[in-house]
Amino acid sequence: MKIYVGNIARESTENEVKALFEEFGTVESVTLIRDNYTKQLKGFGFVEMPNDDEGKNAIKSLNDQLFNNRPLSVSVAKPKTDNKRSDGGFNRGNRSGGGYPKPRRYNSGY
């Protein structure tokens, strides 16, 4: 079972989170998400527990509990969705774009 853990203090470590969840059963892995540039924690992560009953018990027991002086948000992790836009990120609707009309060109007869 993959578990989402939110509102994690930035000074927390994977080992601390693992120890917290091991009170409820076997922990397969802990992944805390970090910013690519600063390498600081983003405040959330994921815990994988192979036994669903142990995972459900951990969620029920740890949700809203203080950990490093912050109330944790613990729930079943939702499947990752593909957030990439098929249109390249731009609105390519039926609009011509821009906000100004194109200037008219007059035939000068040449």
Image (tube, helix red, strand yellow):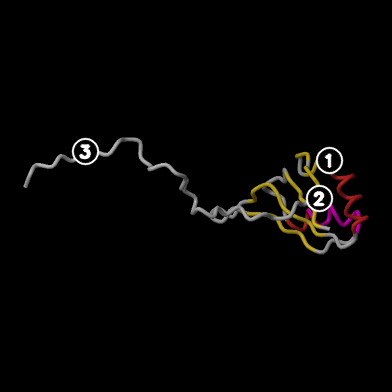
User: Viewer-proximal residue, 36 or 90?
Assistant: 90
Q: Main secondary structure of the magenta part?
A: helix
Q: Position of residue 28 (x, y in %)?
A: 82, 64
Residue 103 position (above or below residue 23): above
**Residue under label 1:** 65
Residue drawn at point x = 50 percent, y = 53 percent: 87
Magenta stretch encompasses residue 63: no
Res. 54 image quadrant: bottom right
Q: Which mark is residue 110?
A: none
Counting residues from the start of the chain, the first of labels 3 and 1 encountered is 1
Q: Position of residue 24 (x, y in %)?
A: 91, 54
Q: Position of residue 100 (x, y in %)?
A: 31, 35
Within-10-Å neighbours for mark 2: few <14, some 14–19, many 20+: some
Residue drawn at point x = 9 percent, y = 42 percent: 108
User: Viewer-proximal residue, 107 or 71?
Assistant: 107
Counting residues from the start of the chain, the first of labels 3 and 2 encountered is 2
Alpha carbon distance from label 3 to label 2: 60 Å
Alpha carbon distance from label 3 to label 1: 67 Å
Q: Position of residue 6 (x, y in %)?
A: 73, 45
Which of the two discs, 3 and 2, sits closer to the camera?
Answer: 3
Magenta stretch encompasses residue 18: yes
For label 2, the SS is strand
Question: Does residue 86 appear left or right of residue 31 in this picture?
Answer: left
Numbered range of the magenta stretch: 17-25
**Residue under label 2:** 76
Residue placed farthest to the front in the image? 109
